[in-house]
Amino acid sequence: MAIRIAIAGASGRMGRMLVEATLAAADCQLHAALVRPGSDSLGQDAAAFLGKDCGVAIGADLKALEGADVLIDFTRPEGTLAHLAACRAYGVNMIIGTTGFGDEESAAIHAAAGDIAIVHAYNMSAGVNLLVKLLEIAGKALNVGYDVEVIEMHHRMKVDAPSGTALMLGETVAEAQGRTLKDAAVYAREGITGARESGTIGFATLRGGDVIGDHTVIFAGLGERIEISHKASNRTIYAQGSLRAAHFLADKTSGFYDMQDVLGLR
């Protein structure tokens, strides 16, 4: 039986990638395509941008979630939380790729996982999540004598910084080294800063053009430098990762998961 997929933000760049990937997957069915109220795309066929009709009209009524197996959401925190409440009400599992949540918002997502199954990841790419695993190894092996810097670049329209993925990478290294990112992170340097403090994790954020997402973690020691990078050239990697997560949730009714679980990297 095909997995019935609903997509939030269906008329956006990521939403369209998800629509296209869902329609192309033989074992998936597009159940609903959602946008915010007042969107210019309301009422259009969800596949119109592909030059064809799929029979699913873009709407804003969250009642359309009823009967779906999973909602894939790459919108914004306020929208995702509204969708989360609807998914709990209708018993729909959820894949969340939204970034920029505060502590209380993250706690609400974890709480909802008692009622529905949720995959929450700041990056759905299989490659990025393999990078996380490599950073666990590197963080433990290079715990002494190496300074850690995280560099990320995204397109000019991205509204949060550092990226959720950059924070995830920094957190991975911090945990591997027995620290918390909250205590180790340095997000800005300006003026006479003094020597670099040992044990910190620095972040550099670049914004410009149409860059999909570049992330590099540097372990800088005396006499050598190790750089572990991932560069995304197309958003289809996030769509394919999301569909992989949808298949992972197919037999689950509750629980909180991430892409490490989906890829079997735990």
Image (tube, helix red, strand yellow):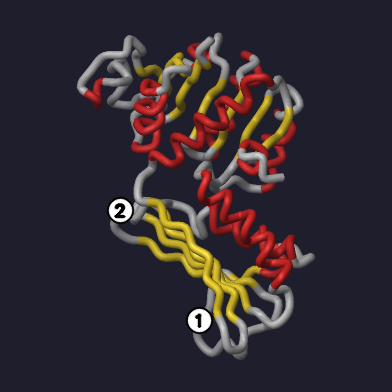
Element at label 1: loop
**Quarter the C terminus occupies:** top right
Horizontal arrangement in the rendering, residue 60 relative to residue 200 (left or right)? left
| Badge 1 amino acid | Glu
What residue is rendered at 75% in x and 67% in y?
A: 177
Total marks in image: 2
x then y, percent, for residue 79: 51, 32
Mark 1, mark 2: which one is toward the viewer? 2
Q: Is residue 255 above or below residue 229?
A: above
Quarter of the view holding residue 156: bottom left
x then y, percent, for residue 257: 68, 36
Q: Which mark is residue 190?
A: 1
Q: Residues within 10 Å of mark 1 (few under 14, many from 20)?
A: few
* Residue placed most toward the observer, 237 or 111: 237
* Residue placed most toward the observer, 117 or 221: 221
**Quarter the N terminus occupies:** top right
Residue at the farthest right position: 178
What residue is rendered at 67% in x and 58% in y?
A: 172
Q: Is residue 155 above or below residue 222?
A: above
What residue is rendered at 73% in x and 29% in y?
A: 255
x then y, percent, for residue 71: 53, 24
| Badge 2 amino acid | Asp
Q: Which mark is residue 29?
A: none
What residue is rendered at 34% in x and 14% in y?
A: 57
Residue that carries the numbered disc 2 in the rendered image: 210
Q: Residues within 10 Å of mark 2 (few under 14, many from 20)?
A: few
Element at label 2: loop
Quarter of the view holding residue 223: bottom right
x then y, percent, for residue 139: 68, 67
Q: Is residue 143 above or below residue 244?
A: below
Distance, label 1 to label 2, CA atoms, is: 27 Å
